[in-house]
Image (cartoon, helix red, strand yellow):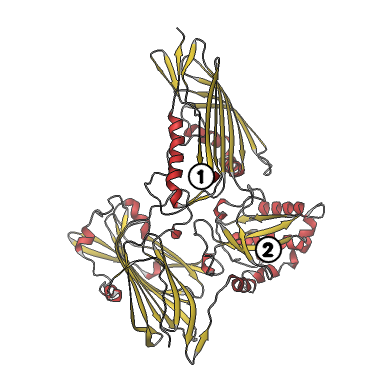
Amino acid sequence: MNNLKFLFVVPVLLLSVNLRAQIKSITFGDIPLEDVEMTSYDPDLGADAVYLENFGRVHLTFSAEGGIQTVFECHSRIKILNNDGFKYADFKKTFYNSGKIERIQAATYNLENGMIVASKLDKKNIYYGKASNQRRSISFTFPNVREGSVLELKYTYTYYGYFDLYPWSFQDEIPVRRGGFTADIPGYFTYKITATGDVKNVNYSRTEDRVNFGNDYVNGVSASWDYSKMPAYRPEPYSTGSDDFFARVNFELSKIEITGHYYKDVSPSYDKLAEKMIDDESFGRVLASDLFLMKKAKKLTENAKSDTEKLKMIYDYVTQNFVWNDSFDAFASQPLKKTMNEQRGNSADINMIMIAMLRQAGVNADPVILSTRENGMLNRFFPILQQFNDVIARVMVDGNVYMVDATDPLRPYNMLPFECLNDVGWLVTSVGSGWVNLKNDEKESKVTSMNLSLSDKGVFNGNVQSIYSGYDAYTLRQYLKLAGESGYIDIRRHEHGNQLFENFSWKNVPDLDKPIQEQFDITIENAAILYNGKIAFKPFFENGIAVNQFYSEERLSPVDFGCPKDEKYSATIIIPDGYTVEELPSSIKVSLPGNGGTFIFEASVDQNIITVQVSTTISSVRFKPEDYNLLREFWARIIQKQEEMIILRPNV
């Protein structure tokens, strides 16, 4: 019998503590009076809620059929500190169909007349649903929640599988006063255990022990993590999913051996994952049932002169005729025929219809599974099916390769949803599976030109022309479709209270392959300061940065912009007769290292005409935490330049 071997990647302090004893010391319903009376959490006075206790335990067992299952037990208490914390009273969890959540206990505790009163969850108010063809969901709301309530939850989640056990987050978006996690693992299993995020408040210990395995106790290891006063994870701007950066622990199985009974050399690979996906009834077998689409696909593309035209024709058909239900999923929820009839489905349903039709039209198209930005980055070294939550298409036409998603009629065929720009995805084919970059030539781009005249009363009049490309054009198309032209203008007026807009016009809105051209007349009031006969104003009227989003002193996660950004702004300002430019901001150029980005500001004056030209470019999509201060300073220099004034003085 082999003892379990660990590789703990992040160094932590060892603590000889038996966490299982700690969990057993928490009795459901035994709530300390001081926890109910608590009105604030001293380590984080701004917290809306706090985990008073958050404990978990995982172990392996045998199912009735003889398969190996993972059993995860959770026991937590949350204190609601103010009304904004009420959202933590809504519990929702999705889980695979092969798993089950049971032994649920939930209650709310409030202080009434100096006594703790418990309101227990009625099991009839627990709702089960279908999250996808592969997953179910469970949800409920704690009863009688008010400011000051303590919520207590205890449940067991059992599921088939043992490759990754159950990952545990030490950290959440609210602080944790005290918590811990225990993994009891039989010595038959060899796991690599990795900790990520800031784990300086976490103490790790391991003891060789007799651990539960099915109906018996065997030699193994009990690994424990104990922590207190864990700070809340504050979502950082330009970041992928929070789970990527929470302080957490993950498990990856490398070998299992029960001498004389069972042996498996566990070497999970993405190639094996692809084989499994191809044979899955909600993935590969769904795509294999595409013959009924042949007639429709050939009819749509009968006049196409190239494979690229076929792609566009089928893409336009799918985006215009199928409605996405706003659900990302790596698996189809139903057969293709049903999706075709209902013309509605999740991201996999719709994109598999597109892939199937492209194949029937003779176009090379294959599925790519991925994790969206909110769902977190993929582990490239250890394939875990649960980490995938979306599928798109890789299409090869006329020497070009495109990543295509057909869930939105306002995006061109060669633009992925921004949520899909998350490093790499896994191409699923019978031959040649592999990593692919999740990008085409996506970008954010806006070019604005203003022609203005300034009166001696400090009022600007003129016109504005803007060109929107990439995601900026997509966003404008969304505004114009959802809010209408008048609604969009109202939004502009709300954002720029000192600006009056008239005579709006747009070109190329229906043509997704072209940038949108926008033009309007403008009057700007209260943008200039009149004092001692002088006129002072800031030359930025569009494309400015309101605040430095990189406000934190330090950053633990990479900065991920998703795609390159390019903003250009120019203004030609005719100053009033009888005035001369007294002060003009100096021209500067600021660059990020490695050609990561540039900010250029230039200002000049010729007689009575001031010309301002500004260019802000972010070329690198991802910046490491060690480059954060440089990026923060870059943003600060931009904002500083925006605040500088042009000053006019009256001629003597």
Amino acid tagged 2 = Asp
Would residue 161 be visible to someone looking at this image? Answer: no
Left or right side of 527 for 45: left
Above or below, 547 against 83 in this view is above
Left or right of 6? Residue 467 is right
Identify the residue position indicated by label 1 in the image: 593
Q: Camera-side residue: 423 or 503? A: 423
Check the picture and name the quadrant holding the N terminus. bottom left
Amino acid beneath label 1:
Pro
For the point 45% across and 48% down, the residue is: 627
Whole-percent x, y for residue 463 in the image: 58, 25
Is label 2 in a helix, a strand or a loop?
A: strand
Residue 386 in picture, x, y percent from top left: 52, 68
Residue that label 2 marks: 366
In the image, 508 versus 318, the foreground residue is: 508
Would you call the spot at circle 1 few (<14 residues within 10 Å), some (14-19), or many (20 or more)? few
Q: Nearer the viewer, mark 2 or mark 1?
A: 1
Toward which corner of the image does residue 464 lie, by quadrant?
top right
